[in-house]
Image (spheres, rainbow, N blue to C red):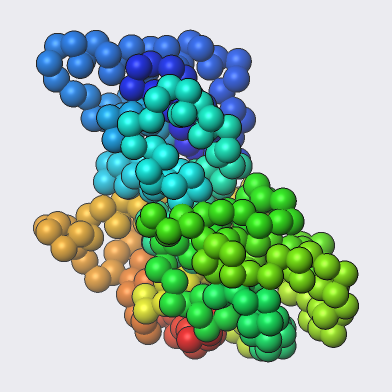
Amino acid sequence: MAHLFAFSAGGLQLFSRSSANVAPLRDNLNAIIGPLYAVHLFVEKQGARIVASKTENYRVVWKLFNDSIMLILVQQEIFEAPTHTTALLDFLFHAMEFCLGPQTLVRPSPDALKRAMGKMPFAFLDQLLTETFLYVTLDAIPVALSPSKDALEDYLDAFHRGVGAEAGFILAHGRVVAATASFAQIQRTDAARMVALVTSRSLDERESVVFLGDQPHSLVVREIVPGLLLGLFGPQGTVNIEHVLSDAFGEYWQGVNAECLEAADIPSYPTPGATTIDPGLVAFACVHLASGRALVHPAPPPDDAAAAAVRTLLAWWRMRADTERPDSSYASAEAYMCCDQGRMYTLTSHGLRLAAAFSVDVPVHALRTLARSLAAQLAPALALAGHS
């Protein structure tokens, strides 16, 4: 659970956002926002600076960017790591720069700041708050393993070249099912932001401008079939928008209509069909270290039992990510934890960083064997998800 509040340096409230898995704090908004900003002002007047605070259930972090925008993040997570919360605030501000341009947020006047906020796709921030594990903890790009990948990528390669795009990708339920080779050349963080922005459906089927550094680029979105979105990217003015939005678009993709429908209907279990999964496995998350491609099972929306296991698993991994920094004395290659939601195990093997949750019926001595077996089965397919 996460809530984000933004103020100008002068105390003007700019916006408040919440992750998709919690209800926004509309009823108690004023009661919450006022004290949070007042704490910052009080500490500042004492000649000090407040960075973070923690209650029994919440962690609060304050940070001022460019002497212009104060972001306040409120999170309710078990095992929450302080470095993760701070990194998330940085990531969210850079996401605002990605949409608005970095120069727009450098000491703007109050009027300029209000105009900029009017252009901000706030559903994009909600998406990032909802999937912080993927985008921040793992610095990863979510993928799904579709048997239609090869056919879709053949069509995608030809289409993106034909319209002058630098790169292209196809999403199903927020997961990349196909991409051009050039998409893998984009800096991972920028590629992840594009995926999150398209997934949030903040963009109409038209050209939008995003910023890689100071350079404006075009991001064009078009739905191929219900549930399957095409994203095209390139320097501003290079993508043939008219062709992408023309009737010829549907005629072109009709050639792989069956494959598109199959990809749009990916199962909630994002594993290759040949993979044999132990019945004691409840949930897992893994990232391919070389490419940054990540799989999380079960894909949303899971049932209640699996959802609890996934939340615990990801929160535990965030804590592990904090202790496994190179300068940490607690770094370890493998670790496990037993709790009410099951037995958790994390390891690095076969080029993957894997965390898995097993049922309480699985004996502890079997966890390493099962986790290594799962990593061995997932690694080949994950390495080929999208162009290698």
Task: Say which residue appears at 56% left-offset and 75% top-offset.
Answer: 167
Q: Residue at the spot x=58%, y=32% of the render? A: 118
Q: Quadrant of residue 277?
A: bottom right
| Residue at image location 67% in from the left, 50% down from the top | 203
**Would residue 341 appear left or right of 64 to someone viewing this image?**
right
The answer to whether residue 387 is above or below residue 22 is below
Instruction: Decide if residue 289 is on the left or right side of residue 259.
Output: left
Q: Residue at x 48, y 23 (%)?
A: 111
> Residue 265 appears at what percent x and percent y?
77, 69
**Residue 20: where, in percent of width, then height?**
60, 41
Q: Nearer the viewer, residue 116 or 57?
A: 116
Q: Is 213 above or below relative to 113?
A: below
Report whether residue 147 is seen: no
Q: Is residue 384 left or right of residue 304?
A: left
- In which quadrant of the rendered view does residue 67 lie? top left
Most foreground residue, 88 or 339: 88
Counting the numbered discs, the total is 0
Q: Position of residue 272 (x, y in %)?
A: 62, 82
Q: Is residue 35 above or below residue 93?
A: above
Location of residue 260 in the rendering, given as x and y in whole percent from the top left corner? 78, 76
Q: Is residue 35 above or below residue 80?
A: above
- Foreground of the two, 171 or 267: 171
Q: Is residue 207 visible?
A: yes
Q: On the picture, is 169 further left or further right than 319? A: right
- Among all residues in the image, which is located at the extreme front? 237
